[in-house]
Amino acid sequence: METTLTASQLHAIADAIADAEARGTVGERPTRAHPRMTVADAYAVQGEWRARQAAAGRRPAGRKIGLTSKAMQQAVGIDEPDYGTIFGDQIWESGTVVDHARFSNPRIEVELAFVLRSPVEGPDATAVDVLRAAEYVVPALEILSSRVEMDGRSIVDTISDNAALGAVVTGGRAVDPADIDLRWAAAMLFRNEGIEETGVAGGVLGDPARGVAWLANRLAVHGERLEAGEFVLAGSFTRPVAAVPGDTFFADYGPLGVVTCRFS
């Protein structure tokens, strides 16, 4: 995929997003200044931002997949998911107390995460390849955070903003994917003791392993692959639920256990 923006324009957008993250604020969405910006441009911005974060000492730990449901894809006018980078300092344990001010417009989503024991490489990776490569699967909550304005935001803006990843909270029981039909892994999400969302993991492209295979095939376009040891957040099977200071979230995955966090 070829970009349409100049290198200096791409760098300027990456700078603005990094600055908004450092300040805990929301900046102007990239498509406001560049209405013809493309998905290729957005991934180029994300790659520049990722490289700068790594150069500053942050350790890339994996990837997230977003917009895996048909309803969400139709809402933003695309026909495939998107993805972003997860750094090691963004993976937290269940029970974490989250500083609400650290994020912009934080929302919670319910997901499964794969940890790989061996690489998964496209362009022809399948769900079976992912299941063979996975060391284990574990319940997770994704905290979404937007460094660019929400109003009028497009898929291009979201990809530029590292697919809106804020952090990941993991917990429950890690399982060998061979021991469970992942399509039927289910969860109930509570906020302050009231149930907000329910869902089954098959809402992620029919099978969350299929989402991870999609990512491996998408990365192959850029000469990359999913590596052994990577943590891959497979996509939400509930709608995002907004979080305000004082909220406690409790996700019950049944036999896979629970994941909790509280916003201060």
Image (cartoon, helix red, strand yellow):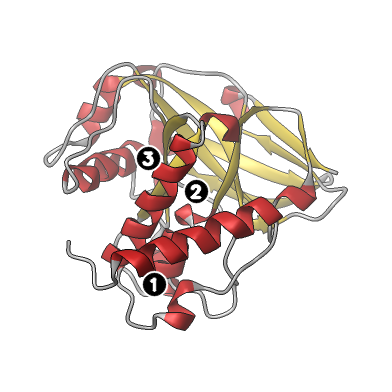
Foreground of the two, 165 or 255: 165
Residue type at mark 2 is: Ser
Q: Quadrant of the C terminus?
A: top right
Q: Which mark is residue 74?
A: 1
Q: Residue at x 29, y 26 (%)?
A: 227
Q: Is residue 187 above or below residue 227?
A: below
Q: Residue at x 78, y 52 (%)?
A: 101
Give the CA distance from mark 2 to mark 3: 9 Å
Instruction: Identify residue for label 2.
Output: 236
Residue type at mark 3 is: Pro
Q: Position of residue 180 (x, y in %)?
A: 41, 23
Q: Residue at x 33, y 75 (%)?
A: 37
Residue 71 visible, this orientation: no
Q: Residue at x 47, y 32 (%)?
A: 113
First of labels 2, 1 by sequence position = 1
Which structural element holds mark 1? Answer: helix
Instruction: Identify residue for label 3.
Output: 208
Residue 182 visible, this orientation: yes
